[in-house]
Amino acid sequence: MKKAKISNRYGYFDEATGEYVITRPDTPTPWMNYLGEGKYGGIISNTAGGYSFDRDPKNRRVTRYRYNAIPVDQPGRYVYLRDQESSEYWSPTWQPIPGRKLETYECRHGAGYTRITSQYRGIWAELLYFVPHDLSPSPSPTKEVEVPCELWVLRLRNVSDRPRRLRSFSYVEFSNWNAEADLNNLDWGQHILHSHIREGIIYTGTVFRPTTTFFASSLPPRGFDTNREIFIGSYRDLSNPIVVETGKPSNSQAARGNNVGMLCHEFRLKPGDERELIYILGVTEMPEHVTPLVARYRQSKNVKAAFAALKADWDAFISKFQVETPDAEMNAMLNVWNQIQCRATLFWSRFVSAYETGLGRGMGTRDTAQDTLATVQNAPERVRQNLSTLWRLQFQDGHTWHQLFPLTGEGGVGLAAEYPEYPQWFCDDHLWLLMAVCAYLRETGDFSYLDERLTYTDGGDDPLWGHMQRAVDFTLTHRGPHGLPRLGFSDWDDTMNLDHGSGKAESVMAAQQFCRAMLDLAELCDHIGKGEDSRRFRVLKNEMAAIINQFAWDGEWYTRAFDNEGKPVGVQAEEHHKIGLNTQTWAVIGECAPEERGKQAMHRAHA
Amino acid sequence: MKKAKISNRYGYFDEATGEYVITRPDTPTPWMNYLGEGKYGGIISNTAGGYSFDRDPKNRRVTRYRYNAIPVDQPGRYVYLRDQESSEYWSPTWQPIPGRKLETYECRHGAGYTRITSQYRGIWAELLYFVPHDLSPSPSPTKEVEVPCELWVLRLRNVSDRPRRLRSFSYVEFSNWNAEADLNNLDWGQHILHSHIREGIIYTGTVFRPTTTFFASSLPPRGFDTNREIFIGSYRDLSNPIVVETGKPSNSQAARGNNVGMLCHEFRLKPGDERELIYILGVTEMPEHVTPLVARYRQSKNVKAAFAALKADWDAFISKFQVETPDAEMNAMLNVWNQIQCRATLFWSRFVSAYETGLGRGMGTRDTAQDTLATVQNAPERVRQNLSTLWRLQFQDGHTWHQLFPLTGEGGVGLAAEYPEYPQWFCDDHLWLLMAVCAYLRETGDFSYLDERLTYTDGGDDPLWGHMQRAVDFTLTHRGPHGLPRLGFSDWDDTMNLDHGSGKAESVMAAQQFCRAMLDLAELCDHIGKGEDSRRFRVLKNEMAAIINQFAWDGEWYTRAFDNEGKPVGVQAEEHHKIGLNTQTWAVIGECAPEERGKQAMHRAHA
């Protein structure tokens, strides 16, 4: 295989390790990586900005992040270092002191971890961030329980030629778990969170529920702070906190206000000396389990084992799908980065990212169904689990909720309040589910899945196969004047909100998707011996294709949709919205014959 | 009258001007003032932090503010100054460069305006901020229209002994009006706002609606920027924007992303020279009216006249109520500051403040009713208008919505989603409305108000007097096991959420409030010759007082409430919630006889 030459002025892909290496901190925008896999996790930038949450970024936010603010990409998972002789301080991750020029800097975004290394004034430092997978076997005699957490491993080395005395100051800002209220309801939020320290562990909680954020380290701290304003000081910011500037922790135990995790340590390093300091950050409803968990990860060998387990898990995931094409960059993308991204979306859809704040819209039904398509070969069990969650969002009439929240699995279209007069369903959601099930069965042959009983969101249940019939029926019974699927709130294009109450708006895209889904179902039925059903699905496909070709083809272009008055959108006379055969998504997915144009070709494309 | 000695290490009250003078910028928290009066306006701190909106801070936000963020109290209405010889730059309002020590600093928070003055390296500078009241007579031949706006007046003086060349750079960050989406929906918000400049005026808008934010100045700008990231530069912040550091505006016209208002001017000042620069910031649905408005306020004389009109308006407001007590501090508070605060709450309730973000809860029905009590002598017309808005929130059964949004006047309890099993009404809201109407009538004698027809939120209408009967009836028909008012979601104490569905929770506070309201109504009826009604209200008061005294008095203390199981809260044995006679609000408001204790005294307190 040829070497991939994926690089630019900010970094390169390291084929030997599968890591993306960022060689300077001042990337045009923060370059994000994902930590964790569907339970505890979050995002981390190449300069340690980002935040953590437990399963749900809206209702179980653990740490804060200020999206789109100035300064950019703050706060995060920071450690300040201070030279006790010179009083100079810096951050080995560059941020939050971007004014300080580090002598060396490198960030390695790997699968499930990020490692940032730098050097300043003869001190080499490395911070490795990851979420451990392995919570068993237990090192303690107590019953094993899952306590969601992340680990930060700081390594320091004196590469100068004289003894050095350093202090370190961690910084992480705690959310009160409801990220939205934490941001907007200051009247409430600023009075409920408080922190205390016991046996070197910071506990942050409220009197209202047992939920407790904890933050600890592998070495006894020399001091600490949990009150943000005391740590930072009046009219200062994260680039010059007063406690770091003076080097003196104030041991503040926040009774309210903004709570942070600052543990201070001191290191005396002879030339060549190296030290390791492990930070443990997590959240739990069972505070009594914090002590054994912290005890476990205070031991370097357990952290090393956890990191090895993480690597092994990712290797297993990625090894299930490897391509070799003549294009080395394509190989790198498909074999590594695409799979890392797809695993993140499998768990969190597009709910958290560099610009999705994790506050608003939950996970999309359509998106989450699509996300299974790219991961069905790597994680078929999880795909089946996600599909079942999505099918449980289906109503008895066949349509589904458009969105769901990952913590509860509850659905919601989220649009009724703002647009009560619009249809409250999307015409493509349930069709994606049909296609996703077919893709899952093609990959796994797990046909018994069709018999699994799943509930409807408005009561009752059915085997999956019954749910699928109702999805087909919903499109068939919700058609507009031409016999095309009604558009609903929109189709795949979220902004195509053409139905303002008339019921005349129709989606050609959904009609084409319906054809594709009917072919998928027909093939499935052929394979499992349901010949009668197969014939029915092919007839349905043919009927819909005929309608498309009769009403949506103007001789040169396919109409994109019909609007609230039943008028075509995207015809010869218009500049936008026109669908040519060769650029048409479903034609490409289907058996496209690009050389043939016109009705016949379109018909065959879905045949 | 004795001089008030209101002062501390951060400032003092200047009795001569009625201003609060802040003498150092680093106050422990930002000290906020209000600009505007119910239409366009906002908050401004003693270092120019804060934001503006047009009527509604949630749906018509004009500029951004980052609550509870680090750095604190940013952004705001800033002007940077740069010495073109030394390249040194500073902000005459201290923020957003708190690291720069100014040689002098003073902020004067007045009624409806804020003036910040400082000196640095021989340059004296003053910034005066206010919202003009006077939009007529029109200086232009076009039809007069109201274009909401604010003015910043910068004055510069060279107090050094050499000629100076300065550049100024304004900075204000534009919201996309929906403040919540602007903060949380970056996927959308980062793609819709764009800016262009024409005739020295920055226009910021979207393609979706005519709403346009505009920003202009009285002198032709030498350059400008509207793209935040270009102005600030990579990984910089408001303390060191690259454009200010280099002194070179880049003339960026933002096509999307974060839009800001930066206009750059150059000044050549001989020793003793003074210059004035006026900034005009506003929002409108009629962009064609921006040019005449800007033309008007580009003229210093019109700005001076507007400021004089503002002062006259406030003098008229405040002069309607003046007290003279032996306590000078009390006089200053009642005659100036309390009235400024009360006028702000009259317009915006507690929707915007140093910690109320203007995002979440709208204005409270209870709060807004209370806010009329303190302003009925100053602004009776506006009080009547507010009361009518509140009464339109009433349902036919007599209770009211608990909250409303000022832009639309629409109500909403806002709690049904989170607490569906709790009662969706508050037992005190409608009682406050009764008391507020009586206070209004006592002050104005405007008894015809009782005949004004007002709609109900769920259909139909009635004269105000009919609404008031229904408010009385609601309490009478929503009583618990003892005959006391059911607690509903809560009473005046928002967190007293004792009714979890049993209907047994009762509020002694609301019972006492009911007694007070019945007395108010009886007095009103006596005055307007409704003797029969007067007798009925006195009987209702006596009956409720008897119930209180029979069931809520344990011989030593009054019970605060009864909980979901009907058990008393706040009795002898408990540490909290106990109500003593002398500290009891309603008793103080009523004819309290503090020397008498026990049932008889309580009875008389409400007699």
Image: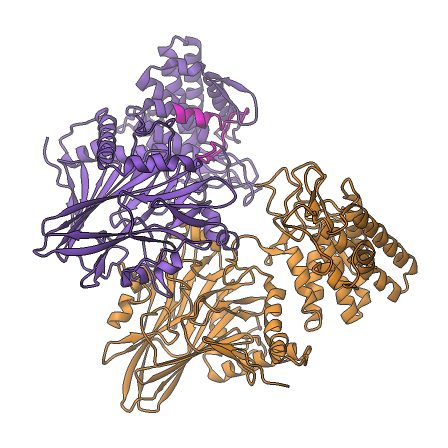
Chain colours: A orange, B purple
- Kindly give the residue lying farthest to the right in the view shown: A532
Q: Name the image quarter holding the N terminus of chain B.
A: top left
Q: Is residue B394 magenta?
A: yes
Residue found 37% across the figure and 37% down from its top: B290
Q: Which residues are magenta?
A: B385-409
The answer to whether B97 appears left or right of A301 in the picture is: left
- Is there any visible trace of residue B554 in the rendered image? no
The answer to whether A94 appears left or right of B20 in the picture is: right
Secondary structure mainly formed by the magenta segment: loop
Residue found 76% across the figure and 41% down from its top: A480
- Is there any visible trace of residue A565 in the rendered image? yes
Q: Nearer the viewer, residue B263 or B527?
A: B263
Q: Is residue A271 magenta?
A: no
* Image: B177 above or below B161: above
Residue A23 position, x and y percent, is 44, 78
* Image: A580 above or below A13: above
Q: Name the image quarter holding the C terminus of chain B.
A: top left
Residue found 27% across the figure and 29% down from its top: B594
Give the tally of numbered discs.
0
Residue A43 position, x and y percent, is 50, 67
Residue A590 position, x and y percent, is 77, 63
> Hey, which quadrant is residue B113 in on the image?
top left
Residue B487 position, x and y percent, is 48, 35
The answer to whether B55 appears left or right of A584 in the picture is: left
Q: Nearer the viewer, residue B238 or A85?
A: B238
The answer to whether A575 appears left or right of B575 in the picture is: right
Q: Nearer the viewer, residue B480 or B441?
A: B441
> Hey, which quadrant is residue B326 in on the image?
top left
